[in-house]
Amino acid sequence: MQSKKFTTEVGGRTLTAEFTDLAHQANGSCLLTYGDTVVLATAVQNKSMREGIDFFPLTVDYEEKFYAAGMILGSRFMRREGRASDEAILVSRLIDRSIRPLFNQKTRNETQVIVLTLSIDEDNDPDLLAILATSLALGTSNIPWAGPIGAVRIGKVDGKLVINPAYKDREGTPLDTVICGMNGKVNMIEAAALEISENEMADALALAAAENDKLCEFQNKIIKEVGVPKAEIKIAEAPPDMQAEFRKKIAPKLEETIYIKEKLNRYEAMNALKDQWLEECEENFADTPHNIADSLFEDEINDIVHKNIIEKEKRPDGRGIKDLRALFAKAGILPRTHGSGVFYRGETHILSVATLGAPSDVQLIEGMEVRAKKRFMHHYNFPPFSVGEIKPMRGPGRRDIGHGALGEKALLAVIPPVEIFPYTIRVVSETLSSNGSSSMGSVTAGSLALMDAGVPIKAPVSGIAMGLMLKDENNYKVLTDIQGPEDHHGDMDFKVAGTKDGITAVQMDVKLDGIPLKILGEAFLQAKEARIQILEVVTKELPKHRDELSPYAPRILTLHINPDKIRDVIGPGGKMIQSIVAETGAEIDIEQDGTIFITSPSQESLKAAENKIMSLTKEFEIGETFTGTVTRIFPFGAMVEIAPKQEGLVHISELAPFRVNQVTDVVSPGDEVPVKVIGIDDQGRVNLSIKAIKELPLKSHDQRRAGEDEARKQAQRRPPRR
């Protein structure tokens, strides 16, 4: 086995890049180690172009391997990896969003990156290694690519920004963000935060940019030593006569169609013009591939949109660069759901619905890296009718999962802790009409749905998508609330969500090699202005969460018992808890610390279950009085059940204020008697007294005889406790 290793220090730990012949048939590969976390990244590109497509065919797959965690996971019937988990899809998107801008987007050679996680420790997240290993695999290969890039995680631990914090330090941190970039610029951000300020975010970006430059310097030395020459990739260009024909007949009409305000009318006009152009190309330029003509059309749109915004601040729908589209918010539009909200921003219309469930409704996650219970979920759907298209409905795609996760990060920061609101919460955001930034629309609609459901969120959250048209670092415009052409042809899609007090989530993708920190600072401040405007519309509709839950939402009662009493509630083989559930109709969830959650749509059911549990777990105090049932008779006294499955002993001397010769002279099994607690020993055994409350008369001969017979039977069944 051939091997060459390179090392550097990142975040106080050693990063080792190893180049071997393990995957020697790939164009490039890299084995990257950080602590005991190890990933293998490979990159392969076809030598020939894929004909007839109008996009760069890049595929990125991050593969979780259960053996990396030293566990045999999966279902009982399929002990192997299957469909990619949501976590794996999100890491695949991180890698894709980081590396894609550094390819020539006119490349038509299929390219695939596969990252395998081979080992994982308890400190170092493999997602960063996956990005860095991919950068080195591409950088040292013959695949044309304008890297390398750096990637670091910035967390805030004990009030300080930390590079690549360990898993344990990321729990509850006010900032957890992955930032990629090169040459002092940033080309990808994925952040979750607890209402941090724009200044704090700027500090994190500056720290990350400096660290990424060091990582790029490390990678460039490796590429210089072990890299191979880049292959020549044929980039198809339109012939000069086709370009001249386009400039003459199509370009003058194109600008007019771009500035039709209504989306469907604009697309109809643009499609008609494109069809006219393609028909002409088929007639006059039959030897030139269809996608070349299409690319010429799209490039012209890109140039027109850039030029008019940078030079004239002219946007396709006529807004100023900081103007928001028309806003509308409405809560409580569905009668039977627990909470609902609708939010409009121009032609982007989102319906969000909140559902409250029992604690047992949590999502169980058992993956290579994450094993947890998830009590808040946000799911995002993007049906084809939302953009006037027809496509098969086959479940959530990578984009849906990514947008859902972004909305979840944004809202999670304001979800109340389980101690305050013990419900499992699911929000589903349906994109009913889309013209840009539906993910941020789902954050706003999601806030409305949560408040309508009566969830006591810390504050409403909204989000906005910012764009950028850049000629150079001195000639650019940051755009608020991008839509359609600005998203597709712009240089940046920068989503910022938060409350009025701070940022809760950030996601940024670019089409350039990176964005200078100065421009990002402007974008953050501009995003805050827009966020405040949206929140004013939201709070005007619903100032705070509703005081009462929907009548269709379940009610939850929380109890706290001595953990030693849990076994009494569960019973042998779970029989006791099953009987309570069957009798009352309530759901019961028990935590190891003795917390019990009772869930039911009915108050009567809640109360019945509470009474049964409290009687099972009651801890008695001296002086309390009860009416109990005699269960067993012994020569020295009688056992009396004073609560379900809980007994106390009435010593023969405590049966009556006079001398009792035999216990059965006074009580028999099945008798109901008044008792008082007169003692509790160090083992929790309860001593009772009848004479302290009431004198019981002597029984007749027949009653005594029957009691004696019953006592003998009881004694044969079960030996006395003492």
Image (cartoon, rainbow, N blue to C red):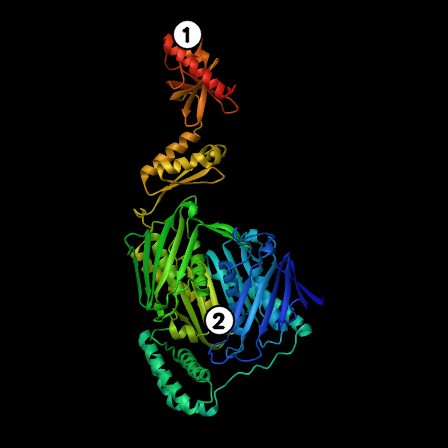
Within 10 angstroms of label 1, few (less than 14), some, or many (20 or more) residues? few
Disc 2 + disc 1, Cβ < 8 Å: no
Q: Nearer the viewer, residue 384 or 206?
A: 384
Q: Please give left or right for residue 540 compared with residue 295 in the image.
A: left
Q: Nearer the viewer, residue 647 or 677?
A: 647
Within the image, what quadrant is residue 253 found in? bottom left
Residue 186 visible, this orientation: no
Within the image, what quadrant is residue 349 found in? bottom left
Q: Residue at x 38, y 77 (%)?
A: 313
Relative height, residue 34 to residue 693 (above, below): below
Instruction: Tell me the SS state at disc 1.
Output: loop
Within 10 angstroms of label 2, few (less than 14), some, or many (20 or more) residues? many
Q: Please give left or right for residue 711 compared with residue 450 in the image.
A: right
Residue type at mark 1 is Phe
**The N terminus lies in which quarter of the figure?**
bottom right
Q: Nearer the viewer, residue 166 or 105?
A: 105
Percent position (x, y) of residue 270?
35, 80
Percent position (x, y) of residue 526?
41, 67
What residue is shown with label 2? Answer: 510
Q: Nearer the viewer, residue 9 or 338?
A: 338
Relative height, residue 116 to residue 456 (above, below): below
Q: Residue at x 63, y 63 (%)?
A: 32
Residue type at mark 2 is Val
What residue is shown with label 1? Answer: 658
Residue 150 visible, this orientation: yes
Percent position (x, y) of residue 220?
64, 72
